[in-house]
Image (cartoon, coloured by chain):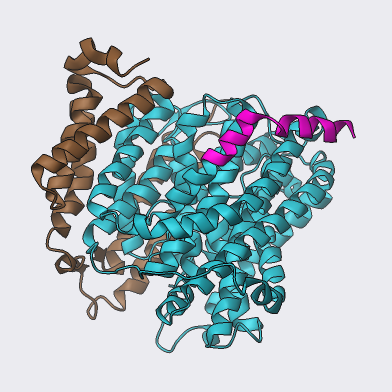
Amino acid sequence: MVILEDVLGRLLDLNLMLVIAGSAVYGLVLGAIPGLTALMASALLVPIIIFMDPIPAVAAIITASAMAIFAGDIPGALMRMPGTPASAAYTDDAYGLTRSGHAALALGAGLFASATGGLASAAVLALAAPLLADIALSFSSVEYFWLAALGLSCATFVAGPSLLRGLASLLLGLAFATVGMDPVSGTPRFTFGSTNLLGGLGLIPVLIGMFAVSELLRGALADPQAEKAPARIGPIVRGIGPAMWRHRTGLLRGSGIGTLVGALPGAGSDIAAWISYAVARRASRLGRRDDQDGAVERIMSASAANNASLGGAYIPATVFGIPGDAITAIVISVMFLKGINPGPTLFLNDPGAIYTIFAIFFIANILMIPLGILCIRAFGAILRLPAAYVSPMILMFCILGAFSVDNTLFAVGIIGVIGVLGYVMEANRIPIAPAILGLILGPLIEQTFMTTMLKSHGDLMIFFERPIGGTLGVITILAWVAAVALHLLPARRPAGEPALR
Amino acid sequence: MKVNDVFVGLFFLAVGVFVTAYAWTLEPPRHLAYGPGFVPSLIGIGLMLVGGAIGLIGLRTVHADRLVSWPDWSASPRGPLRFLTVPAAIAAYITLVDGMGFLLTSTIIFVAMLVIAGVRPLRGLAVGLLSSIVLTAVFASVLHVPLPWGPLQSVSGWLIW
C-alpha cells in the first residue's frame, strides 16, 4: 500500500507527464521516418535526458521506444519501407493490404496489436519481475556468465539464415568489446597509445554508426521518388474490434513470444517479430492462408511480439542488470548515470522507483492508440517531405548524438568508420545485430569468466557445479549443438547449397 | 558493395590473425593464470576458424560469382555522389569544426548535402542556416553540449541563454 501511494505520487507529476507526452510524439515521428529505429530514437534521447531526473529520463526512453516500434509499421505499410527493423517481418503483408485498398486495416491491425502486446508484457513485467528478482539474488558470476552466453547464442542463431555469418559478426563485436582496459587487471588492449580508446570504442557511437549511418549510406543509393504513398488511408478504428477478436489467438501468441524473446538477454524486438511471424506463418491455421485474413493474422502476431519484447527486455534489465536488447542497454547506462543501480537489490532499496517504471509501460501503451491514430493521419504530410532535406538532418543528429556522449570528435570519427563497416557487412549478408550484442555483452562475459576462474583457481568445472548455473550451462551447450545439427541436416537446405554457409 | 565470399572469409581471417597475434603480446600479471590476452586470443582463434570456413565455402562459387559487385548506381543519377557525401561530411565536420565552429561547419555541410541532392543553392543556404541555428540553440543552450564557436565566439551569446 505504501509502495502504491509512492508510485501514484511519482506518477502524478506534471513534469513526468509532459516528458511522456513529448517523448511519445518524438518516438512516433522518428519511428515513422525510414532509417531511424527505436534504438536510434533512444540513443538520440541520451544527450537530452542526461539532464533530467531519473524517473522522467527512463520514462522518456520507454515511451519513445514503444512509440517508435509501432510507428515503424506506418512507412512499412504505406511505402514498403519499414521504419524500423522490427517492422520488417510483416512489411510485405501490410503493403499488400495497402495495395488492395485496405491500408486502414493494415495500420489498424499493427496499432492495436502493438498496444495489446505492450500491455501484456507490462503485466508480465509487473507480476513476474519481483519473483525473478528473488531468484536473481542468489546468482553468482557463474550464472551471469551463462545467461550472457545464452543471450549471445540465441541472437546469433536467429540473426539470419547463415550460422557462420552470424558467428563472424558476433566474434567481431566481441573483438570490439576487448578494446580498452582489461576488466580484471586494467591492462590497455588494442589502444595503440590512444587515450581515446582506453575507455573502449563507446557503445553509442558504434550503435549510431552501425544502424543510422549505414542506413543513410544505403538510402543515398535509392531513388527517393520511386514510391509514392496512397492519398487516403480511411477509417482506422472501424471494424478493428471484430478483427482483434477473430485474431485473438495470434495476438496472445505474439504477446507471449515477444515477452519471452525480449526477456532473453541479446534478443530484441526485430528478432521477436521474426520468430512470431514465422510461428504464425507455419503453425497457425489462419496465418497459413494467403488471403486478407492470413495477412492480418501475421501482422497482428508479429506486431504484438515486437512491442511485447520491449516489456520483456526490461525483465533481465531490472532484475539482473543485463540488457535484454540494445535499447535496454542504453536504459541501464542512463539508470547507472542517474544513481539507480539496476539489479535485484533495486527491488529492496527503491521499490517505488521500479514500480513507477513498470506503471509507465502501461501509460505509454495506452497512450499509443490515440497518438498512433494521429500519427498515421499526419504521416501523409511527412511522406511528402523530400528525402533530400531529411538525410542531412539525420546526419547532423548522428554527429551531435555521438559528440554529446563524451564531447570528443573521436566518437564522431567512430560513427563514420563503423557506419561504412556496417554498410559493407549488410551488403555482404553479415547481420549486424550479433556484432552489437557482442559489443554489449562481451565485457560482461569476460568479466564474469575471469572472476569465476580467479575464484576457482582455474578449475573449469565450477561453471557446472551450481544448480542454476549448471542448468543454464547445459541449456547453452545444447542450444549450440542443436543449432549446428540443424544447419548440417540435409533436409533443411536447398539442393546444392552447402551445409554451413 | 558486395564482394565474393572468399574475400569476406579472408577479411575475418585477417582480423582473427591480428587479434590473436596482438593478444599473445599481452603478458598475464604474475599472480594470474589467465591474463588480459586470454579472451582476445580465444576470439581471434574463433575469427580465424569462421573466416577460414566462409572463405573455403566461397571457393566453391568463386568462378560462378563476380569477385566484386558494385551497388546499382543507376537507381538514382545522383546516388553515388550522395553516397560519398555521407563519409565526406563526417570527415569535413571533424576537420573543420574546431577552427570554424559548429554553426558555420554545420551550415556548410547542410548546403553541400542539399545541393548535391538537387536542392537549389539559395534554398539550400536558407534551410542549412536555419537548421544549424535551431540545432545550435537546442544542443548548446538547452542541452549544454559544449559546441565550438570558432570565429563566431563573439556572437555566441545570441544563441546561448
Q: Is residue A265 left or right of residue B158?
A: right
Q: Position of residue B124 (x, y in %)?
A: 15, 42
Question: Does the stretch in magenta take in A6?
Answer: yes
Q: Name which quarter of the figure residue B4 lies in.
A: bottom left
Provide the residue span drawn in magenta: A1-22
Query: Above or below — where is A460 with respect to A110?
Result: above
Indicate the chain coloured cyan by its letter.
Answer: A
- The residue nearer to you, when weighing A138 against A415, is A415
Number of numbered callouts drawn: 0
Between A323 and A391, the one lying in front of the other is A391
Say which quadrant the C terminus of chain B sits in.
top left
Indicate the position of residue A93 as horizontal and vertical percent values. 48, 77
State the residue at coordinates (66%, 87%). A285
Which quadrant of the rendered structure holds the N terminus of chain B? bottom left
Q: Is residue A251 magenta?
A: no
Residue drawn at (24%, 48%), measured in percent from left and top?
Answer: A389
> Chain B in the picture: what colour?
brown
Most frequent secondary structure within the magenta stretch? helix
A193 displayed left or right of A15:
left
